[in-house]
């Protein structure tokens, strides 16, 4: 238990240090779909569960794969995701709510959470969506795509935003749509001005 905690703290320190180093050495990489460089960032990921989950892990695996390879998604920022059995740079985890809360003091049992290099998708949200989406009749499939893209966005270096896109009224993928749409339209995919990657 203590070992696990130390490991987690150490990991948080390492990723913080990595981000600081990267920021200081001119590696703020902005990728765009129409980038002339054609530079592609390769991200391997593995799929696991944590705690007792009610969701189907194989279904989770399939939706993650579809979402991360979808042409409307982060591939537009020139990121290529490849699933590996284990040892990925990114760990996609379908987690029991208590396990999400235990991952970091910044996480809660009500939401999904990213603690690099782990993306924890909350099993309750995975199965039931969020009130904000359900009230508008948005499909569970689109909720799942949104939450995967949002959390992976954190892995790619994004923080939260709070403004709708001006021209379309869509919610940016990095708006916390699970807790409330702030008057924006629900949206499962990164917007054009969100197609960048930092610190990976
Ligand atoms: Zn978030």
Image: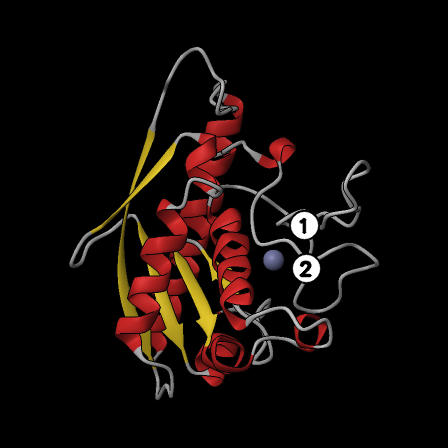
- Is 37 situated above or below 72? above
The image shows a total of numbered marks equal to 2
Asked if the residues shown at circle 2 and circle 1 are in contact, with their CB atoms under 8 angstroms apart, the answer is yes
The answer to whether 186 appears left or right of 194 in the picture is: right
The residue that mark 1 highlights is 160
Look at the image and tell me whether residue 187 can be seen: yes
For the residue pair 82 and 1, the one nearer the viewer reads as 82
Q: Position of residue 150 (x, y in %)?
A: 55, 54
Q: Residues within 10 Å of mark 1 (few under 14, many from 20)?
A: few
- Is 99 situated above or below 10? below
Q: Position of residue 123 (x, y in %)?
A: 45, 79
- Is 109 situated above or below 118? below
The residue that mark 2 highlights is 176
What residue is shown at x 52% (from left), y 41% (from top)?
Answer: 157
Q: Residues within 10 Å of mark 2 (few under 14, many from 20)?
A: some
Secondary structure category for the residue under label 2:
loop
What residue is shown at x 36% (from left), y 63% (from top)?
Answer: 63
Considering the image in quadrants, where does the N terminus appear?
A: bottom left
Q: Is mark 2 within 8 Å of ligand 1?
A: yes
- Is 196 situated above or below 140? above
Q: Tell me the mark number nearer the camera, choosing from 2 and 1.
A: 2
* Quarter holding ligand 1: bottom right
Q: Position of residue 135 (x, y in %)?
A: 73, 76
Q: Is mark 1 within 8 Å of ligand 1?
A: yes
Comes first in the chain, label 2 or label 1: 1
> How is colour applied across the structure in the image?
secondary structure
């Amino acid at each position: 238990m203590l070992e696990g905690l130390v490991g987690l703290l150490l990991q948080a320190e390492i990723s913080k240090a990595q981000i600081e180093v990267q920021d200081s050495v001119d590696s703020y990489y902005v990728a765009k779909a129409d980038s002339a460089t054609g530079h592609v960032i390769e991200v391997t990921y593995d799929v696991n569960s944590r705690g007792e989950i009610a969701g189907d892990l194989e279904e989770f695996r399939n939706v993650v794969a579809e979402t991360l390879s979808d042409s409307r998604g982060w591939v537009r920022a020139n990121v290529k995701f490849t699933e590996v059995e284990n040892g990925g740079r990114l760990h996609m985890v379908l987690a029991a709510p208590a396990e999400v809360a235990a991952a970091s003091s910044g996480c809660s049992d009500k939401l999904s959470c990213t603690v690099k290099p782990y993306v924890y998708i909350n099993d309750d949200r995975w199965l039931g969506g969020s009130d904000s989406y359900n009230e508008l009749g948005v499909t569970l499939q689109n909720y799942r795509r949104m939450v995967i893209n949002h959390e992976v966005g954190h892995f790619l270096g994004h923080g939260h935003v709070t403004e709708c896109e001006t021209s379309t009224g869509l919610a940016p993928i990095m708006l916390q749509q699970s807790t409330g749409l702030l008057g924006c339209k629900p949206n499962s995919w990164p917007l054009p001005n969100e197609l960048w990657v930092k610190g990976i």
